[in-house]
Amino acid sequence: MPSHSLEAVNLSKNYGSFTALDNLNLKIEGSKCVGFLGPNGAGKTTTLKLFTDMILATKGSALINGVPVHQNKKTALSHCGSLIETPEIYPSFSPREALMMISEIRGIPPSERKKRLEEAIAEVKMEEWIDKKVGKFSKGMKQRVDIASAILSEPEIVILDEPTTGLDPRGAAEVRDIVKSLKKKDRLIFMSSHLLPEVSEVCDEVAMIDHGKLLVYDTLENVTSRFSGDGSSNSVEVGFSRPIDDTKMISSLQGVLSVERMDSRNLRIKFQGGLKNQENILANLAAMRIGMISFRASVSALEDSYLNLIKDTL
Amino acid sequence: MTQQNSMTDVSLEGNRVPTSMTQIGIITKYEMRNYFRSRRFFILLGLGLAIEALLTFLVYHDGGSSGFVNGLQFYSTWWGDSATYIVIFSAIFFGGDAISGEFQNKTGYFLVGNPIRRASIYIGKWFAAVAASLIIIGIATAICLVNGIYYFGTSVPSQFGESLIFTLVYLIAALGLTFMFSCTFKSSSFSILVSVILLLFGFTVIEDLLDVFVHIEPWFLLSYGSQIIGNILMATYPAHTTTGLGFGGRHGAPITITMFNATVLEGLAIMLLYFVVTAVLGLVLFERKEFN
């Protein structure tokens, strides 16, 4: 199976004297979710717009599966669904009509259009509204239809620009579930977000950008281990099905520096070393049979990394 | 597995991105659906019907056929005077913000991120605007014809057919122009305003000033080319005429006004040139316009 890829080669974008993107070189490939982080004005949306040919690069190329987007847009974007900002849909159209138009443009076989359209609408929980006029929808509802449009053609690559913006907590959780389900379908997802917990929850890798320059691109674990705290420790958040009263056994595990109680069923474990130690701690916790139900890199570790890497907000 | 197919631009698993021609058809179809649900289509339809109803009433009130020397004069008065306005209003209503609206309302974001060339979107929208305008013009033509046949019988003068063809050429030129304006600005109201000023007043005012003060044939103005719509319906096709207005000019020189009249070929050439130039410029502008 061919590997999906997004690649920026010396990609730059200037607006007059302002450099929005400065010689970005980034290649992401495979089936994974990559979070794209950075402060306001860092160049995140600019990058995503260059990948969807919404703006023109001052220099360099954006490639999708090796195909230059600007020079060969139809081929490049045929493999890619996207959600950039919150596109508006003609108010007189229903979601069914809007998505039918996209399905025709994308060349979904006529025999499959109705099924795929209804599946995409069901994925974003908009079945009840499928034949209602979009003009009456809230921003969150439009965002859901836009997400349905991005996944309608079952693209290999999905580009999402702050996909949970404007959604209520349930809507945001549902979008995260959609992203997770896309990962299971071997898709490559490139997602910008300001929400670090969201990135921690769904992304395998993160790219951080500031002032148009790429600061780091690596796995979530590597980024947090290299850039959180003093760089010598890592954190994981562990959830349990029952309250954990005694944490001494956990504290005594090799490499563990401290155990912090987040609440009765959730602990934050700080440890030294890299992935090997993390793997050992996970194995030991599982062996203890104390009701562990979740184990993930700490959000605060990602936040630490973010704050260490990005010093300014503008 | 990705494959190239000569019948289509791209094909991949399950999906086969249609040719650009097919995509133009898709955009036209959905754009027309949007027009038919829009207030502006029905406002223009109402406006067209009101103009035609008023003309019907006025002709009836002035004694029907007795008010005209012959059928040609009837069509000249009716069609020659109203056709250009119907075209101008159609171009403004359907083209004035056709592209700028996509930026201002952010509806363009929904389309542009898909595997479709911007040119296909532009052309598809242009075809839809032409089709919507043709409906309005078609209704106006039908009402004019019904009145003409009622008063002067079924022998419709051939010049009316020619005038109708010129009207259609004017329509594509005017829509080319308004589409170009709508690509120039990101604000709908601004692009509509520029279209209104130029098509309704600007061209005519410039043309009059040139006639009176400079005596230069305004071959570069679209309104000058569109004169052939009405001129072809005159009993004698008008030539350039210079009229004296007395001796009030500098050093007692006579004041004259030169009324320039484009020949049919000149008129067609001006309108087609406008269409080609504005279509190319509009496409280039849209290709380079950024969604930010």
Image (tube, grey):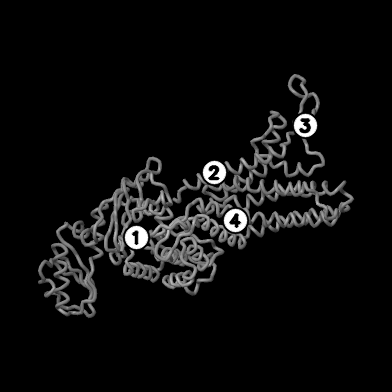
Query: Which element is circle 1 on?
Result: strand
Q: Is disc 4 on the same chain as disc 1?
A: no
Residue at left offset 76%, top offset 28%? B256
Task: Mark 1 and mark 3 in contact? Answer it, CB < 8 Å.
Answer: no
In the depicted view, which residue is nearer to us: B68 or A283? B68
Count neighbours of disc 3 (C-alpha within 10 A) and say few if under 14, some if 14 to 19, many if 20 or more: few
Task: Mark 2 and mark 1 in contact? Answer it, CB < 8 Å.
Answer: no
Q: Which mark is residue B241?
A: 3
Q: Is residue B162 visible?
A: yes
- How far apart in space, not on screen, are marks 3 and 4 (Cα)? 40 Å
| Chain of the residue that carries numbered disc 1 in the rendered image | A
Task: Mark 3 and mark 4 in contact? Answer it, CB < 8 Å.
Answer: no
Q: Which mark is residue B280?
A: 2
Identity, as a three-letter code, of the amino acid under mark 3: Thr
Q: Is disc 1 on the same chain as disc 2?
A: no
Disc number lying in front (1 or 3): 3
- From the image, tell me which residue sits under label 4: B128
Query: Which element is circle 2 on?
Result: helix
Disc number lying in front (3 or 2): 2
| Chain of the residue that carries numbered disc 3 in the rendered image | B
Task: Mark 1 and mark 4 in contact? Answer it, CB < 8 Å.
Answer: no
In the depicted view, which residue is nearer to us: A244 or B70? B70
Q: Is residue B286 left or right of residue A40?
A: right
Q: Which mark is residue A53?
A: none
The N terminus of chain B appears in which quarter of the rendering?
bottom left
- From the image, tell me which residue sits under label 1: A191
- How far apart in space, not on screen, are marks 1 and 3 (Cα)? 69 Å
> Counting residues from the N terminus, which is met first, the one under dot 2 or under dot 4?
4
Query: Which element is circle 3 on?
Result: strand
In the image, residue A234 lies at what x, y percent? 18, 63
- How far apart in space, not on screen, are marks 2 and 4 (Cα)? 18 Å
